[in-house]
Image (cartoon, rainbow, N blue to C red):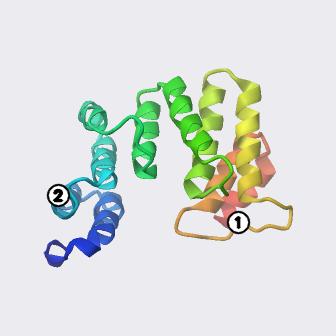
Amino acid sequence: KKALELDPRDVGLLNDMGNEFYFYLRRFDEAYAVLDRSQQLAPDSETVRANKVTLLQGQGRLEEARQQLSQLSENATDEWVINARVNQALYERHFDEAVRVIEHKLTADAGQPPDFFDKFFLVNLGYCHEWLGHAEEARNAFTRAVQAIKPTPETVAGPDANGTPTTLALAYAGLGEKEKALAQAQQA
């Protein structure tokens, strides 16, 4: 109840509560209530709408999620929207669509240092290419992910809120580097 009394400056906090905290606890009704309040405070927020899509996806309500996604701009640059689009494509096994969305995002970010989403999307890109039978493209994506997360052999992918060590473990696994993947997963 306290969260529903927050002011518009707290939309980010509400999004985090609805999309992450309540989602992970599988308390979907409370998550929707918090995101509904967030949407009242920021009615044009693509992030809020994408977070609702993520909740629908988490419940397996893929048709509703697809409908909600169709209401968002195809050219949206919000990383949560892109993440929701990629997840939808993955859930529906439309790997070519996921590749298109990820490559569009990475092209738009060209020349900028990769952020968490870029690194995570590179790993997803690798697996999508693998599932499509594009071995070389998969290897390139996994290699780019490793280089983005661990630019030098001495770089340590320390624990963080985004799960970077886990993302690195997945990239190593995609490259077939079992020992590195297991070591990184253990560290994660």
Extreme residue in the right direction:
153
Q: Residue 181 carries which label?
A: none
Q: Do the residues labelled 1 and 2 touch (CB within 8 Å)?
A: no
The percent coordinates of residue 140 (x first, y second) are 76, 36
User: Circle 2 — which element?
Assistant: helix
The type of residue carrying mark 1 is Ala
| Residue 168, percent from left and from top | 68, 54
Q: Where is residue 39 in the image (x, y as percent from the top left)?
A: 20, 58
Measuring from the top left, give residue 17's x and y in whole percent: 30, 67
Label 1 crowd (10 A; few <14 / some 14-19 / many >=20): some
**Is 127 displayed left or right of 73 in the figure?**
right
Q: Nearer the viewer, residue 166 or 137?
A: 137
Q: State which quarter of the image contains the C terminus.
A: bottom right
Give the number of the mark in front: 1 or 2.
2
Residue found at x 52% / y 68%: 161
**Which disc number belongs to residue 157?**
1
Q: Which residue is drawn at 61% across and 26% down?
A: 131
The residue under label 2 is 36
